[in-house]
Amino acid sequence: MTEIERSEIQQQFHSIFGTGGRVRLIRSPGRVNLIGEHTDYNEGFVFPMAIEPEIRFACRARTDGQVRLASSLYPDQIIEFSIHRKIEPGQPAWSNYVRGVAAELIGAGIALEGMDLFVANTLPMGGGLSSSAALEVGTALCFLTQQGQKMDLSRLALLCQKAEHEYACVPCGIMDQTIVSAAQAGHAMLLDCRNGIKQFIRMDEKDLRVVIVNTMVRHELSGGEYASRRKQCEEGAAFFHQQNPAIRSLRDVTTKQLDEAKGQLAPATFKRCRHVVSENRRTADAALALERKHYDRAGELMIQSHQSLRDDFEVSCPELDFLADQAVTIKGVYGARMTGGGFGGCIVALVQPRAVESLGRHLIESYQKQFQITPEVYITTATAGASVVQ
Ligand code: GLA
């Protein structure tokens, strides 16, 4: 956050909530997942990094136990709830991430005070770049900082995930909250979702740019498709567990075991399992390839990941397919794929620095022509996890 941005957000805070008192500033980044999609809730591998678009928070303690919440995106609303009463989900829907985090912190035995909280975005909401996790983790940091408390980052991620499950009714995995809270600048994170072990892989800015392109569409209806994919994976895992009790999740299934199960599982379930089993392997391979600077290989794996998400996991859509296909026609683009839960949102491309401009131009032009929508392009480095700015 630059000096000017800090003073701007403070001014906005003061004009909504009045002057005086100590105002703290906190930032919480979005994330992009380079590869490893729909593997986190199968105890598998993911490979995300935190990005420059972020949510910024200005907060100030209150002594009456009220939380008053305002957002740059909805200038006329002030949402209010009390931490002295049982915190229930409410309206508008986005406030539930804040309500949920407050409730979970109290549930974890942390004494909270009320606060005035202003939230400003450079991260698109609902664009598949984890605005929900950014809001959750940033909110938690606001409350904790006000109380002079710190929390282990893995515990913080779990608490925020629980808030999302219970207050937003989205049965998400642990990837987003983990990367938003624990990212390291200049690095992507290979996360083993079985045991929480993190390995940071350097993203060399001399060689690489990460380009994210937003389809500006979202076809998913209230998380239903996500929950149904998750259920199919659980059905698959239960089948393999019955065959071999040592198998606890799809993470444990080998390619050979998968091949043997063909014909015994419902065709759709089989395809979901095939995606997860192959995606886990691709993710570990891609992290290794990036570490060794084998960018062509990493790109190839990203392209395969997209195909698997499109054909086997069936969470892509025509807009994502179009952008992913078009991206790799540009010289200097190593690979591209949909990123996040799917059904809209963004693609991510791994690109040589000199190809960034031609890629952006080509995708904007061709996408406009095809869909009559202007996509947003974000060029980003890997940033640090959520932090207190001031
Ligand atoms: C969403 C969820 C994550 C993960 C991805 C798919 O972003 O929040 O936990 O499951 O979808 O990889």
Image (tube, rainbow, N blue to C red):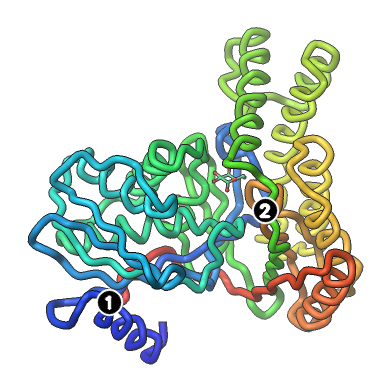
Pick out the residue farthest to the bottom. 4
Does 291 appear above or below 219? below
Cβ at disc 2 under 8 Å from ligand 1? no
Q: Residue, x 25% and y 57% (percent of image)?
A: 80
Q: How dense is the environment of label 1, judged by Cα within 10 Å: few (below 14), some, or many (20 and up)?
A: some
Residue 234, located in which quarter of the rendered image? top right
Mark toward the start of the polypeptide (1 vs 2): 1
Where does the image place residue 79, in percent across and percent down from the top left? 30, 59
Q: Residue, x 32% and y 81% (percent of image)?
A: 12
Does 368 appear above or below 146? below
User: Which is more toward the observer, 171 or 180?
Assistant: 171
Does 309 appear above or below 194? below
Q: Find numbered disc 1 in the image and state the secondary structure of the residue it sits on.
A: helix
Mark 2 lies on residue: 218
Q: Find numbered disc 2 in the image and state the secondary structure of the residue it sits on.
A: strand
The residue type indicated by label 1 comes to: Ile
Q: Rounded to the nearest whole Å, what is the CA distance between mark 1 and mark 2? A: 32 Å
Looking at the figure, which quarter contains the C terminus?
bottom left
Mark 1 lies on residue: 16
Q: How dense is the environment of label 2, judged by Cα within 10 Å: few (below 14), some, or many (20 and up)?
A: some
Q: Residue, x 16% and y 42% (percent of image)?
A: 85
Where does the image place residue 115, in percent across and percent down from the top left? 19, 63
Where does the image place residue 317, in percent across and percent down from the top left? 79, 49
User: Which is more toward the observer, 148 or 162?
Assistant: 162
Where does the image place residue 357, in percent across and percent down from the top left? 78, 83
User: Which is more toward the observer, 342 or 174?
Assistant: 342
Looking at the figure, which quarter contains the N terminus?
bottom left
